[in-house]
Amino acid sequence: MRKLIYGMNATLDGYIAAPGDDIGWGGPPSDELFEWWLVQELASELSLYGRKLWQTMSAYWPTGDQQPDATPAQIEFARNWRDTPKVVFSSTIDKVDWNTRLFTGDAVAEIARLKAEDGGPMKIGGATLAAAAMRAGLIDEYALATVPVLVGGGTPMFTALDSWVNLNLVETRTFPGGVVLTRYETRR
């Protein structure tokens, strides 16, 4: 059975995007934080995306390694992003590229099916898609990079749940700029 990991950068008040889908509140991550996320990406064998996050990622990373100011980590991230198999869950887009397939059916059933397969870890991104997986009890690990900023509203990282999810702390680390990373495993 595969492990499903949900990880995002979030504001101190728990939002992954401010009102208007603004993600500029975090600025560019420090090199150290970016490299931590790169290690996580390299360990993942399959990426699951909701529509909004897919559109954000696919607007930049297919050519991210060709940017004149790209760091070695960004170059490696872009190449890995293109090469890693991806599934985009959406009923409103009709085309995806870059080693990606589109799924328009029952997201929870498909995530459960993928999770039951043999293979390495999968990561899930996008608040709406992750919320459905959370409510279904499918997420095994949470990684949260908390940026010291309050935005007061927007897209929350976490959704309302039907019951508590108990977690075990796996890692805590502080990065430049006061960003605190915490990683938790679901206690089953």
Image (spheres, rainbow, N blue to C red):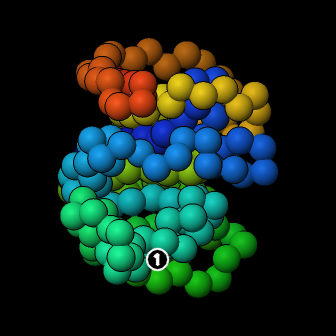
Query: In this rendering, would 11 be left or right of 169?
Result: right
Residue 74: x and y in percent read 30, 63
The one nearer the camera, 71 or 172, is 71
Name the residue type under label 1: Arg
Residue 69: x and y in percent read 35, 69
Residue drawn at x 75%, y 28% is: 152
Residue drawn at x 62%, y 64% is: 51
Task: Say if 70 sits above or below 173 in the image.
Answer: below
Secondary element at image label 1: strand
Total marks in image: 1
Task: Say if 56 sits above or below 178 in the image.
Answer: below
As drawn, the residue found furthest toward the front would be 69
Residue 128 in sight = no
Q: Quadrant of residue 166?
A: top left
Residue drawn at x 71%, y 41% is: 18
Query: In this rendering, would 32 be left or right of 30?
Result: left
Q: Quadrant of residue 70?
A: bottom left
The one nearer the camera, 177 or 100, is 177
Task: Say if 168 sits above or below 95 in the image.
Answer: above
Residue 130: x and y in percent read 55, 44
Residue 32: x and y in percent read 27, 41
Query: In this rendering, would 88 be left or right of 39?
Result: right
Mark 1: few/some/many CA within 10 Å (<14, 14-19, 20+): some
Task: Say if 50 sits above or below 7 in the image.
Answer: below
Residue 26 in sight = yes
Q: Quadrant of residue 171?
A: top left
Viewport quadrant of the C terminus: top left
Residue named by callout 1: 101
